[in-house]
Image (cartoon, helix red, strand yellow):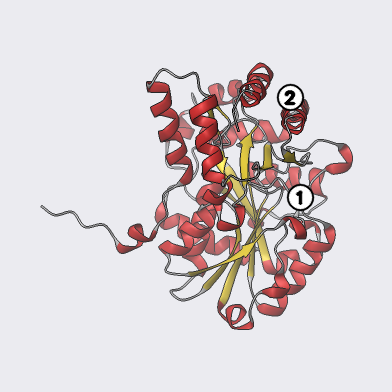
Amino acid sequence: MEIRYNEKLKKLPPYLFIEIDRKKKEAIERGEDIISLGVGDPDLPTPEHIIKSMQKSVTNPANHQYPFGTGLLSYRKAVAEWYKRRFSVNLNVDEVCALIGSKEGIGHIHLGFINPGDVVLIPEPGYPVYNTGTIFTEGIPYFMPLLKKNSFLPDLDIIPADVLKKAKLLFINYPNNPTAAVATKEFYIRLIEFAKKNNIIVASDVAYSEIYYGENEKPLSFLEFSGAKEVGVEFHSLSKTYNMTGWRIGWVCGNKNIIAGIAKVKDNYDSGVFQAVQEAAITALTSSQQCVEDVRKIYKERRDILVEGLKNLGWEVDLPKASFYIWAKVPKGYTSSQIVSKLLDEASIVCTPGNGMGKSGEGYIRFALTVNVPRIKESVERISKIKW
């Protein structure tokens, strides 16, 4: 029997992080001591009080049935209360929908609002799922370059008029993956005006909002600004904030009509988030946030050591204000892919090529701060021994 794949699958670029994981496993099988600074998966454990909450909830038979719907009312209230405390944003429960991780919602939003031929405005370099969902719905991706000269913010003024006529959805992501940039108040105000004028839905991805390095550097929410709820929604996740990547729990919030569209897609594609996980997430959102502060301190120490080490070796790298990524310019004379290969072959270090997340990322590589301090120091030591 001949197996024929859907033509849309053939259009997908290789999923970058699966490819990185494959290369890492091959190196490990060769007996190499790999330091993985590639995929952004926290190495720190989920806080104990969240685990204990899950252990209690999982024994409740009421949580063993299909959860269905937009999430427990108590979970959506917890999200709304968290947004009020963190961003001073008021949310009603019908403006919140539970997700099986924010990746799931980001992939599903296209199914609710994109028809074949519609344009989706996508930041690049950027999270691959923005484009994957576009391909699956036969939309047309229009990539917005994130360049250092623009502080890694998209230049909305250079998008052609004929593209804007067909544009239905625009993704933004701050703190940004992979550049670690943060968005300004002025950018968000301009974005809301732009979206209203062109009748475009804004999908803001703020998965890294709680990984920041100073009280005066707290990342903003798109929803903080007047008019945001009229034009968009925001995706968030407990994955990075509470080291819960494997738990698959997040949410989307904002415009209730957009939320309703996403929820209708989900009703036909999944059966909701396991209620025991939702109850553990309530514990995470409503308990003391000291665990989050502790995580920030750990990432800050790692950030400072790696950035200082790279700078001492002559690398051009900025000190990020948020996220757990380092966006480093590659040494002169090399491409992103060449440096990634060189680091793997000569130092057994895995990192991410900037151009793997979009052509505007050429000339950069991304390091994830997801190993402990001794391994960070060892990474710098290994890089120092490479012959250039």
Question: For the residue labelled by badge 1, is the local secondary structure a helix, a strand or a loop?
Answer: loop
Amino acid at the residue labelled 2: Ile
Q: Quadrant of residue 194?
A: bottom right
* Label 1 Cα neighbours within 10 Å, binned few <14 / some 14-19 / many ≥20: many
In the image: residue 130, left or right of residue 47: left
Amino acid at the residue labelled 1: Val
Where's residue 205, x and y in %? 64, 52
Picture layout, residue 360 above or below residue 364: below
In the rendered image, the quadrant that contains the C terminus is top right
Frontmost residue, 374 versus 383: 383
Residue, far left: 1
Q: Which mark is residue 182?
A: 1
Task: Count numbered badges in the picture.
Answer: 2
Question: For the residue labelled by badge 2, is the local secondary structure a helix, a strand or a loop?
Answer: helix
Which residue appears at 71% of the width and 29% of the height?
306
Where's residue 159, x and y in %? 65, 74
Q: Which mark is residue 298?
A: 2
Q: Quadrant of residue 368?
A: top right
Q: Is residue 340 visible?
A: yes
Frontmost residue, 52 versus 74: 52
Picture layout, residue 224 above or below residue 85: below
Q: Which mark is residue 292?
A: none
Where's residue 187, x and y in %? 79, 62
Picture layout, residue 159 above or below residue 206: below
The CA span between labels 1 and 2 is: 20 Å
Frontmost residue, 303 versus 170: 303
Picture layout, residue 35 above or below residue 97: above
Instruction: Say which label, 1 or 2, has the lower sequence index.
Output: 1
Residue, far right: 216
Where's residue 322, x and y in %? 75, 41
Q: Is residue 276 visible?
A: no
